[in-house]
Image (cartoon, rainbow, N blue to C red):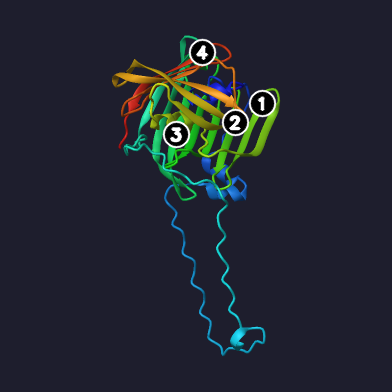
Amino acid sequence: MRHYHSTHGILALALFITGCATKQLDRPKSLEESTSELPLELQKLKVETAFKELQPQPAPTPVAKKKPKKNKKSKGGVEPTATPTATPEPVAGFVIKNRRPPDGREQYPLGEVQTWNVGYLGFSAGKASVTIQPFKYINNRKVYHLDAVAKSSAIMNLFYSLDDKIESFMDFEGLFTHRFHLVLDETKQKRDAVEIHDIEKMNVFYWSRLNHSEKGFVEKKETMVIKPYSQDTLTALYYLRTVALTDGNIIKLPMVVEGKTFDVDVLVIRHEDCGTPLGKRRCAVLKPETRLDGILQQTADNFIWISDDAEKMIVRIEAHVKIGSVVVNLEKYEPGQH
């Protein structure tokens, strides 16, 4: 995971290949359990299955009129009326722009499933998939629910088994992260990590729990300032499906990964024909480059192929890791409902 700035930071589908060697928690926490254990001020950012109507404030109880009393300090001999208390203004954040595609198309149709085969050192290491679940709401904002799973193959299980899950919640209009929940269930680790983005305060609360095979139980909690429209490992990849993929374009992504913040520039370097589950399609080839404090990080080249058509399928990913390379190829595409 030391390569998070390049591979783990943008290539979320390869996460289980680049995992650390760690041991286990008793069991991973569910989304609901993780929410209930959050600090009270963050529990308002829980995931709702429906829009929560704001409850009207109760009308003040009528007070019987009394004869005005004289008051030497008041004008006209009438006691001054108390000024109503104003409703506190929300903490200043940023104005969320509508960044949806201008042509009005729905880039994330509900029920869409993309399934990839993950190759490592020349053999199939497992499968990864992302499903677009029904809409949810966080703090009364409509969000996409991206549900990702990764499972190792029978061959990989001989060396290292895994059954991992990510749930990410992406703003419907602003196309940025509200919440990211990672659960790893592997041979040498069970880990539970959550990132809660508070867009009113422009910060993120990061909480990770795991037991390391050598270091024992490790828990980390911290709060960091973030940039507007910050992405996690999964929403960053899906956000690329909404932007123009013209050769020479540079897409800038502020990132939050593993309790770290940094920037990624994604360069559209060329177009080429690729085989996909829907036949041959013209694809844009993207190259992510990581910048930390504005300085380009020297890492191995990684590439992403996205079909430049109506579907914007994530066709292929190549990520260089410590030992060898990870190659992720789209194996199945289920379009969902627009």
Q: Disc 4 marks which residue?
A: 325
Q: Viewed as shown, does residue 224 lie left or right of 150?
A: right
Q: Nearer the viewer, mark 3 or mark 4?
A: 4
Give me the disc on residue 212.
Answer: 1
- Could you tell me how far apart the alpha carbons at marks 4 and 2 are, in whole angstroms? 22 Å
Q: Disc 2 marks which residue?
A: 258
Q: Viewed as shown, does residue 13 lie left or right of 100?
A: right
- Could you tell me how far apart the alpha carbons at marks 1 and 2 are, in whole angstroms? 16 Å
Q: Quadrant of the N terminus?
A: top right
Q: Tag 4: residue type?
A: Ser
- Could you tell me how far apart the alpha carbons at marks 2 and 3 are, in whole angstroms? 19 Å
Mark 3 or mark 1: name the one nearer the start of the chain. 3
Mark 1 or mark 4: name the one nearer the start of the chain. 1
Q: Secondary structure at mark 3?
A: strand
- Could you tell me how far apart the alpha carbons at marks 3 and 4 are, in whole angstroms? 25 Å
Q: Tag 1: residue type?
A: His
As rendered, which of 95 and 31 lies closer to the eye?
95
As rendered, which of 245 and 311 lies closer to the eye?
245
Residue 150 position within the rendered picture, expressed as x and y whole percent measured from the top left: 47, 25
Instruction: Judge whether 240 appears above or below 328 on screen.
Output: below
Q: Residues within 10 Å of mark 3 (few under 14, many from 20)?
A: some
Q: Residues within 10 Å of mark 1 (few under 14, many from 20)?
A: some
As rendered, which of 139 and 217 lies closer to the eye?
139
Residue 149 position within the rendered picture, expressed as x and y whole percent measured from the top left: 46, 29
Q: Secondary structure at mark 1?
A: strand
Residue 71 position within the rendered picture, expressed as x and y whole percent measured from the top left: 65, 87
Q: Viewed as shown, does residue 101 lie left or right of 84?
A: left
Instruction: Judge whether 97 appears above or below 54 on screen.
Output: above
Give me the disc on residue 147.
Answer: 3
Instruction: Judge whether 67 appears above or below 327 on screen.
Output: below
Residue ID at (29%, 22%): 278
